[in-house]
Image (tube, rainbow, N blue to C red):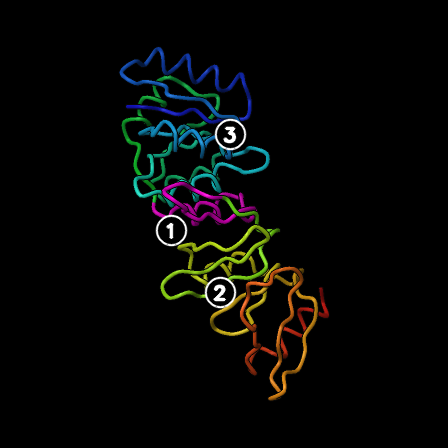
Amino acid sequence: MKILVVDDEGPARARLLRLLDDVGQHTVVGEAENGREALKSVEKNQPDIVLLDIRMPGMDGIETAQHLNQLDAPPAIVFTTAYDEYAIDAFEANAIGYVLKPIRRERLEQALQQAARLSAGSILQLRNTSGTTEQRKHVCARAHGELKLIPVADIFCFVADQKYVSVIHESGQDLIDDSLKSLEDEFSEQFVRIHRGALVSLQAVDALKKTEDGRTQVMLRGPDNVDDLIVSRRHVANVKRRLKKG
């Protein structure tokens, strides 16, 4: 099995490498010290298993796993964690592979044997039950066979586009697989629904204006590639309330 080791602490990576050398029967194809490096290494080296630390600055292990899950053939993931006994219940309840720090060889061997690919639902459930409730800092699009990370802070709006969602952001426009409902649930503090097919960043709203036919239109700062964003009557009051509150 080809293995990628991901941990922001050098000594922790070195310990895992020694343990894997002792275990044998596996090939380490790379190391990474953060989520971004991990995504690049997975695309380059195509590991079968990723040993993935959870607590990392910038992009934590759970967000990294969510992005890896977008791949056509995602690697199996074994989380490495220093969580206490109560948080471990979240892993076991979702049949997610993990090894508890400080890592022991026997437990590592067992986790590698049991490594399984994760469903999107199991990763989200882990985030909700393990105490790692921080939102993603990026959404992930697939462009030309590669993963593309789009910072949430750069997004103007999400717009339904047939069976996909179009993300309009500072660097252009991309399609993602996430549903509009799941995006609304995850980013409810930063975005507001204006009609059943669109979410708009509160920070990106420049103004609301009335159209000639009396409807309410959202004017965004920046993008010139957005069709008229009309607020449906049922959402007008909430949009005004959220903008005033913000």
Label 2 secondary element: strand
Q: Magenta stretch?
A: 119-148
> Residue 206: percent from the left, percent from the top?
70, 66
The total of numbered circles placed on residues is: 3
Mark nearer the viewer, 3 or 2:
2
Residue corresponding to mark 1: 121
Task: Characterize the local packing of mark 2: few (<14), some (14-19) or many (20 or more) Cα atoms within 10 angstroms.
Answer: many
Q: Which residue type does callout 2 highlight?
A: Val
Of the image marks 1 and 2, the number of the one nearer the N terminus: 1
Residue visible at 38% across and 44% down in the picture? 144
Residue visible at 58% across and 66% down in the picture? 192
3 versus 144 height, above or below: above
Q: Which quadrant of the figure has residue 98? A: top left
Residue visible at 45% across and 35% down in the picture? 39
Q: Nearer the viewer, residue 41 or 90?
A: 41
Residue visible at 33% across and 34% down in the picture? 76
Q: CA distance from mark 3 to mark 2?
A: 39 Å
Of the image marks 3 and 1, the number of the one nearer the N terminus: 3
Q: Which residue type does callout 3 highlight?
A: Ala
> Residue 139: percent from the left, percent from the top?
50, 49
Q: Which mark is residue 82?
A: 3
Q: Nearer the viewer, residue 125 or 177?
A: 177
Q: Where's the C terminus, which quadrant?
A: bottom right
Residue corresponding to mark 2: 159
